[in-house]
Image: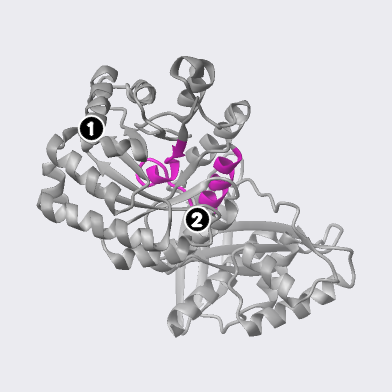
Amino acid sequence: MNQIRISDITMKQTGAEISLSFKEKIELSKLLDKLSLSVIELEPIVQPKIDSLRVKSVAAAVKNSTVAVPVALNEESVQLTWNALKEAKKPRLQVCAPVSPVQMEYLFHKKPDGMKKAVCETIAACRACCEDVEFVADDATRSDPAFLYEIIRAAIEAGAKTVTVCDTAGAMLPNEFTAFIRALYEGVPELKQVCLGVSCSDGLSMADSCAIAAVRYGAGEIKAAAYPVSTVSLPNVAKVLSAKGEYYNASCAVRTTEMKRITGQIAWLCQTGRSKNSPFDNGVQEDDGGVYLTGHDDVAAVTKVAERLGYDLSEEDAAKVYEAFKVIAEKKERVTARELDAIVASAAMQVPPTYVLESYVVTSGNTISATAHLKLHKQDKVLEGVSIGDGPIDAAFLAVEQITGQHYELDDFQIQAVTEGREAMGQTVVKLRSGGKVYSGRGISTDIVGAGIRAYINALNKIVYEEETV
């Protein structure tokens, strides 16, 4: 029985259809990994600093699946991508190129010979770094058959282990797509030496049927999405292969027993987009994975956990955090990840404040919209912002964004009690992400809204300080 590989492309759909924060993408990769998918595909590296960190973080989080990242058609992109991906347990580099005349000419401004040369050189550069290289022929069903066979043959010769053909337009019926697959094997006998993958758009609502039909005629890998947007549905193809595997002489390793629960979580992540009226970006349900530290842990262990939380501590800040950690660790049996967040916020990277809170007025109730009016000092100027939000914290953070003219990804917001009783002090920790790096701020007040505003401004000042000194 043929083992069919399922390659998930959910994260490649992010953008206009699905908006995911940095933290949500890490969480999504962990959920997909639990399904025992063969491959998890990521978006290409566009912004080197931010995207390289994202790829590294996913590579570290995924324990079972292959992690695949596309490269541009040049050696610089190959090296940049490989440097971010190389720590993955099972890395794969993808060389994606259009093969239809229209896309080659208008998207890449290349003639067929130029495209074939660029693809072969890029695949060769990828093979010098990584054993698992995939060639993805975009818009293959609308290409000239003779050229398609030629470029696939050249890609295999250059070292591609997987060749994927895409019905980008999604205009084929199952019988047309299977005829296309049969013709491929006849035109390129070398395809039998590698794995043939298929990617089908859902223009005619036939993507699932076309993908399953292709399996019967030799396809060994299917690109699907746990949260499909005009593409093959992962739950559907896994269900068909599980129920009708004997008929197709095929099976897949996807854990169908957990499919409904995990795809439900993924759908919740993908549907929890950022409201236009909210600074809160992510829908990740907090889980520190049981991470904790004890008084026996040294500075290296504390720094390692801080890195897992997203902090990039300097040697000086690592020493300050460790000293603060030891004070806490002497008083209690263990220190949790959330408590370490508060330690980092209070001990690391204390900077001169660019923005200082002068005053705030927040109104809210069950019959009115929450409104916040903030005044901040910046040097000798008083800046004001007024905003409406879904709640008092929401409105206050939006007012800060209005004043600064900047939106930073709100990675986490924590509320903790510091003292007991009616006059209890509340502590908040706000984590903002900028340039892929996490900055945390801490605020304390008997008014939890005031504590939240102070924590946000504290984190904001750290970002501004670092941006101005770079």
Q: Residue at x 23, y 21 (%)?
A: 176
2 vs 1, front mark: 1
* Amino acid, disc 2: Phe
**Residue 443 appears left or right of 387:** right
CA neighbours of label 1 inside 10 A, class few (<14), some (14 to 19), many (20+): some
Q: Which residue is mark 2?
A: 22
> Which label sits on residue 169?
1
Residue 16 higher or lower than 360, as above or below: above
From the viewer's perspective, is 350 left or right of 20?
right
Residue 333: x and y in percent read 89, 63
| Coloring basis for residues | one colour
Percent x, y for residue 416?
75, 59
Frontmost residue, 97 versus 130: 130
Q: Report which quarter residue 36 is drawn in.
A: top right
Residue 47 in sight: no
The kind of secondary structure element at disc 1 is loop
User: Is residue 14 a member of the stretch shown in magenta?
Assistant: yes
Question: Mark 2–mark 1 contact, CB under 8 Å?
Answer: no
Highlighted range, magenta: 6-34
Residue at x 49% of width, y 62% of height: 86
Q: In the image, what residue occupies the spot 16% across and 51% down?
A: 107
Query: Which residue is depicted at the point 17% across and 43% down?
Result: 150
| Residue type at tag 1 | Ala
- Residue 24 drawn above or below residue 210: below
Q: Nearer the viewer, residue 263 or 152?
A: 152
The answer to whether any part of residue 220 appears in the image is yes
User: Where does the image place residue 8, in percent across and percent down from the top left?
Assistant: 45, 39
